Amino acid sequence: MTDIRYLTILGSTGSIGENTLDVVARHPDRFRAIALTANCNVEKMLAQCKQFHPVYAVMLNAHSAQQLADKLRAEKLEITVLSGVESLEKVASLPEIDTVMAAIVGAAGIRPTLAAARAGKHILLANKETLVMAGRIFMDTIKQCQATLLPIDSEHNAIFQSLPQHYNGNLAESGVRRILLTASGGPFRKADLKTLATVTPEQACAHPNWVMGRKISVDSATMMNKGLEVIEAHWLFNIAPEKIQVVVHPQSVIHSMVEYIDGSVLAQLGNPDMRTPIAHALGYPDRMESGVQSMDIFKIAQLNFEAPDFERFPCLKLAYEALTSGGNMPAVLNAANEVAVEVFLAGKIPFTTIPTLIRHVMQSIDRREVTCLEDVLAADSLARNTARKWLDEDRQDFVA
Ligand code: NAD
Ligand code: MG
């Protein structure tokens, strides 16, 4: 008989959050959702509260929390409703939970994810931005506070599954030569470069293989997502950037590979469905049913591989530069990207201006060391202000 796991799901109303609850619902004997959190989607949170009866429901802003509390009262559901970033930190570190699914999107995830690390929780990490912004600080906190970490990002979960079972963070000792990090290439892998300036947010979000939140969908279309994932892999597995080879693999069947010094290449394959890495991490070290269909290998028939095209995907190059530069630069890259994606999704800048804006911000800010969360947050806010200033003052074709 396996022990019950008590969960906080940060970002329960998002794509990863919903997939997590889908897996949790298949195993009521193994998991209990103690806390659910969301930004402002009151209706979705209400539906999740009705189905999963958590002890806590947290909405980011007080107005949404009030609306939720009223609706829960009308339903006669006794659930404690909280609001604000401090409440996110609180439910990420409750004594009565052991596991935290970190699935908030963007820099907003850093405080609660770090709170979970400080409280020594078992963290299932989807929020890659935490590692991009504060890789060393986060990994050091995990170690010092005896927290544990499993990757949810499909590529990193695949790498974890393909590494030796007791991998200790030392590639050479483990006989690993390099990592092959696969990427679908997104919706514009083959698009005429001249058409990229006029693509719409809907086209950018129409990923060929995965259904995801809008921010990560745009990141996949620019391949910034793969850039963020190179940084994520660097911190998770202690791998030098030159030992991470990005491989464009349009079918998204191989989720990444590990090459060993004897020439063996181990890969993890499966349908592109996030319930597989989620179920792997939730059940680890056991395997659990996830609801994912068998892979139809005859229908897939072919697997293709291409080298990444840095001219088509300048964001990927910017991410490598930020990683090599280190210090505050990955946080600057991440924040500039978040602003760029937000204004692109609002129809205010062309798709091709996303890398232009990020490059401008990276060139405008001096490299500095970061030693604590405050340094990281300062870099984040300086980058956001620099991006907004460029959008407001310096750019002629910005649609206000
Ligand atoms: P999403 O936009 O679908 O969901 C984001 C969740 O975060 C929602 O619950 C939302 O309410 C909450 N949220 C948003 N802003 C917030 C804020 N300021 N404060 C508190 N909560 C806030 O995003 P997603 O696609 O589920 O992605 C979540 C994370 O997982 C991202 O870091 C993404 O890179 C990563 N990830 C996602 C996928 C995927 O398939 N969707 C795959 C790999 C990694
Ligand atoms: Mg991924």
Image (tube, grey):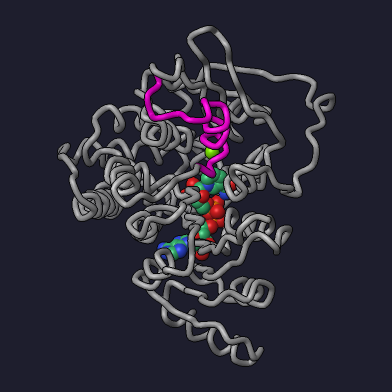
Side (left or right) of 385 relative to 271? left
| Vertical side of 371 occupied by 182: above or below | above
Instruction: In this rendered view, identify the residue nearer to me: 357 or 111.
Output: 111
Residue 163: where, in percent of width, then height?
52, 26
Q: Is residue 196 visible?
A: yes
Look at the image and give the residue range highlighted in magenta. Answer: 151-171
The residue located at (37%, 66%) in the rendering is: 89
The residue located at (65%, 31%) in the rendering is: 252
- In which quadrant will I find the C terminus? bottom left
| Vertical side of 190 occupied by 329: above or below | below
Which residue appears farthest toward the top when viewing the image?
A: 262
Which residue appears farthest toward the front when viewing the image?
A: 1
- In which quadrant will I find the N terminus? bottom right
Q: Is residue 389 visible?
A: no
Side (left or right) of 48 relative to 216? right
| Vertical side of 224 occupied by 335: above or below | below
Residue 17: where, in percent of width, then height?
58, 58
| Location of residue 263 (image quadrant) | top right
Residue 246: where, in percent of width, then height?
49, 23
Instruction: Please tell me whether residue 157 belongs to the stretch shown in magenta.
Output: yes
Instruction: In this rendered view, identify the residue nearer to me: 46 or 150.
Output: 150
